[in-house]
Amino acid sequence: MSKLRLLDLFCGAGGAAKGYQRAGFYVVGVDIKPQPHYCGDEFYQADALTYPLEGFGAYHASPPCQDYAVTRSIPNRDSSRYPRLIDPIRERFKASGKPYVIENPPPAPLCNPLMLCGSMFGLRTRRHRLFECYPPIYFAPMSCNHSGRVKKPGNGKSLNIYIKDSDDCNVTVAGHLFSLKAGSKALGIDWMSRDELAEAIPPPYTEFIGKRLMEILS
């Protein structure tokens, strides 16, 4: 029996793809930029807004988040560089009538989103991500557990000085202030560059969602 196909739009290096693969999907990634580290089953460099939706049982999209993020308050920032794509992607997905997921960080304007955190999956990161799911998924596996210290960036000359792989702490994998080894361990990702890790979705998030999509589709 062939695997169900899932389309992964704005796929990046494939943090979401890995989770959906673990849930049992055959994952096809699409991104406007080359993604040499993409871990899905197939990759196509193309425009996510026009890529055909036919032939897939479910969809995932992680549209650019810069204009929804906290950094939108930076003075004189050029909003034209960061188009708001959640609404057009939602319209495309809804018209298909098939299950879909749209991911973004808070405070993106998603509809009744599910919030997931690394602490829910035993990861050493507090990365919060929102997931608009159709059909809805209302409950996370557990509540956030933000106990334990977070390693703060210091003023060392080497990134390895402030967040080491051996540190027994939570790692904020953002702002590029972490070593590749520590970031990889914190997110459970071992195939990405440090820049890719800074934006990645930890695979356990979409594995959790993917298993529920599988239940719906089967």
Image (tube, grey):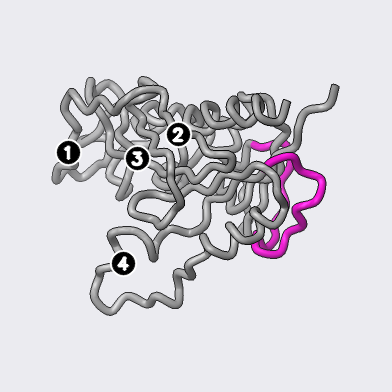
Q: Which residue in the structure is indicated by mark 4?
A: 72
Q: CA distance from mark 2 to mark 1?
A: 33 Å
Q: Is residue 56 magenta?
A: yes
Q: CA distance from mark 3 to mark 1?
A: 18 Å
What kind of secondary structure does the magenta stretch mostly adopt?
loop
Residue type highlighted by circle 4: Arg
Q: Identify the image quadrant of the C terminus.
A: top right
User: Residue 158, image x and y in percent?
Assistant: 25, 42
Between 116 and 80, which is closer to the camera in this rendering? 116
Q: Which mark is residue 139?
A: none
Say which label, 2 or 3, has the lower sequence index: 3
Q: CA distance from mark 4 to mark 1?
A: 24 Å
Residue type highlighted by circle 1: Lys
Say which label, 2 or 1, has the lower sequence index: 2
At a point 41% along the width and 57% down the height, the residue shown is 109
Residue type highlighted by circle 3: His
At a point 59% along the width and 25% down the height, the residue shown is 211
Between 198 and 202, which is closer to the camera in this rendering? 202
Q: Identify the image quadrant of the N terminus.
A: top right
Residue type highlighted by circle 2: Tyr
Q: CA distance from mark 4 to mark 3?
A: 18 Å
- Label 2 with label 1: CB-CB less than 8 Å: no
Q: Which mark is residue 152?
A: 1
Q: Which residue in the structure is indicated by mark 3?
A: 128
Binning the other alpha carbons within 10 Å of mark 4 as few (below 14), some (14 to 19) or many (20 upward) gives some
Find residue 179 and report its image quarter.
top left
**Does dot 2 land on a helix, a strand or a loop?**
loop
**Does dot 1 land on a helix, a strand or a loop?**
loop
Q: Which residue in the structure is indicated by mark 2?
A: 138
At a point 34% along the width and 50% down the height, the residue shown is 106
In the current view of this chain or complex, which residue is farthest to the right?
1
